[in-house]
């Protein structure tokens, strides 16, 4: 019996037969999006973020509240800034290349 609604659900079966069929509920960490199996009484130390109102995986890196989507957005901004910076540097290099070349000799 689960106390909360699972984020996802799976059925694992043995390829040798149906004797190993196992139904599994998963939660997804609100801060790193790790999927982890819900095993009541397993002793795994998970956590719950009251700001996100969702479970977390319990990893030390996931203790501060930084929602996963915020991390993705920050990475996307960093990538876009790097692309724009590189495009700017490429444009400058092209301009410098044009300026540094002496005019072609005539005659
Ligand atoms: Zn996590
Ligand atoms: Zn959080």
Image (cartoon, helix red, strand yellow):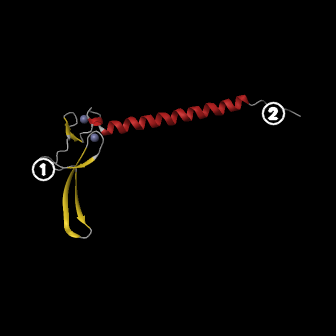
Task: Quadrant for residue 53, please give it.
Answer: top left
In the image, 96: left or right of 66?
A: right
Residue at point 60%, 35% (across, down): 90
Counting from the top left corner in percent of width and height, residue 52 is at 22, 36
At mark 1, the secondary structure is loop
Q: Nearer the viewer, residue 31 or 38?
A: 38
Give the camera-side residue of 50 and 40: 40
Using residue 36 as the reference point, say whether residue 1 is left or right of it. Answer: left
Q: Nearest the camera: 16 or 13?
A: 16
Label 2 crowd bin: few (<14), some (14–19), many (20+), radius 10 Å = few
Q: Nearer the viewer, residue 92 or 67?
A: 67
Res 53 seen here: no
Residue where numbered disc 2 is placed: 104
Q: Which corner quadrant holds the C terminus?
A: top right
Residue 1 screen position, x and y as percent: 10, 52
Neighbor class of circle 1 (other Cα within 10 Å; few <14, some 14-19, many 20+) is few
**Residue 28 visible in the shown view:** yes
Q: Residue at x 27, y 35 (%)?
A: 60
Q: Are marks 2 and 1 in contact (CB under 8 Å)?
A: no
Q: Find disc 1 in the rendering and name its residue.
A: 2
């Amino acid at each position: 019996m689960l106390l909360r609604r699972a984020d996802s659900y799976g059925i694992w079966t043995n390829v040798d037969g149906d004797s190993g069929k196992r139904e599994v509920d998963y939660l997804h960490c609100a801060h790193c999006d790790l999927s982890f199996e819900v095993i009541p009484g397993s002793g795994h130390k998970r956590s719950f973020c009251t700001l996100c109102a969702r479970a977390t995986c319990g990893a030390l890196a996931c203790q501060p509240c930084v929602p996963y989507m915020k991390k993705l957005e920050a990475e996307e901004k960093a990538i876009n800034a790097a692309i724009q910076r590189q495009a700017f540097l490429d444009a400058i290099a092209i301009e410098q290349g044009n300026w540094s070349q002496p005019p072609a000799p005539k005659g």
